[in-house]
Image (spheres, rainbow, N blue to C red):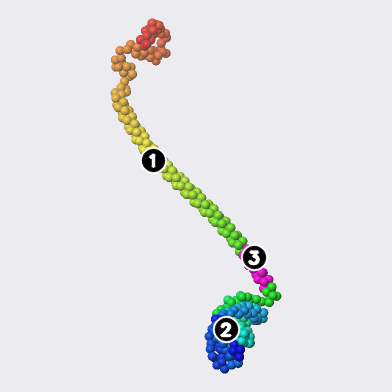
Amino acid sequence: MFGFKHIQFDAMTYVMHYKNGTIHQEGRGLSFFYFKPNSSIVAIPMGGNDLPFVFKEMSADYQTVTIQGQISYQISEPKKLADVLDFTVNEEGRYKKNDLEKLNQRTINEAQTAVTAFIHGLSLQDALGAASTLEQRILSGLQSSPMIGMLGIEIMGVNILAVRAVPEMTRALETSTREKLQQEADQAIYERRNFAVEQERKIKESELNTEIAIEEKQKQITEKKMESEVLRQENKRKLNEMVMAGNIELEQQRQSLVEQKAINDRKLADTKAYVVDTTLKPYKDLDWKMITALSNNPDPRLNMTLAFRELAENAGKIGNLNISPDLLENLLEKGR
């Protein structure tokens, strides 16, 4: 009515009310009446924004890399942004121009500029695995960008959602990766089998070493037994030698004893012979008859025996000899 309007904004919108080209009032969540012919209203959203982006770059091996992500930012200095872009709204609170799209595009351009040189220096495979590095480079590039500073926005974070190659190259890489994984799987199977064979070899080697050790111990035991047997035989031989030496010494002593006894017996016999010879020497020249007569034996049989001996010695001189049976009987009875 008569050019006066009322307008109201929420608390997340920073409002600047220009009147005749000069800021009449400003702040967040304002509500006021204004005179339309000499007023201009700028409304800048202060909430956080998530800006998705997708851009393509060329890798060092001339392959296309598609980078998809999201930038989180908020407008921290609305006056700076109002000086660069037009956020003027009409009487209904709608933007006259779509400069928010310009803000988003400039932010994306700065993000792409921050990683272009980096992607150009990587091979395709390296670029596909560099998501974390890309996040850090975009974040640091935006935070240090003069353009972002002029726009008055604050970068809160960057997320890389995907780094992809073209479908044909993706399939080729998948095939290559699949082959590589298969080779790694085959290598793992080979290593596992080789490890099992090695373990089996070690077990066999351990068993053989154990058997060798047992055989060595058996050999040592046998050698010890042989040494003990040799020592026992040696001791037995020495004992036998000692016994034999003792027997020899005993026999020598016996021999000496026998020899000494023989010498003594010979001396004793010589002594006895000398005594007998000396005793009988006076009778050596006497007739036995005389000796018999000197014996004074009162037995008449002896005399009869001597008589018969005389008769026998002189049998050649005797013609006839009669001996009565009574005489013989008497002699025999006396003999009994």
Q: Quadrant of the C terminus?
A: top left
Q: Nearer the viewer, mark 1 or mark 2?
A: 2
Residue 284, compared with residue 188, is above or below; it is: above
Quick one: label 2 or label 3, which is nearer the N terminus? 2
Please give the range of residues in magenta. 172-190
User: Which mark, by number, is residue 8?
Assistant: 2
Q: Position of residue 120 (x, y in %)?
A: 63, 82
* Residue 86 can be seen, yes or no: no
Residue 319 place in picture, x, y as percent: 42, 9
Disc 1 marks a residue whose amino acid type is Gly
Q: Is residue 122 left or right of residue 321?
A: right
Q: Is residue 124 above or below residue 242?
A: below
Q: How many marks?
A: 3
Which residue occupies the foreground of this view, 326 or 306? 326
| Residue that mark 3 sits on | 186
Q: Picture quarter containing residue 66?
A: bottom right
| Three-letter code, disc 3 | Asp
Q: Quadrant of residue 81?
A: bottom right
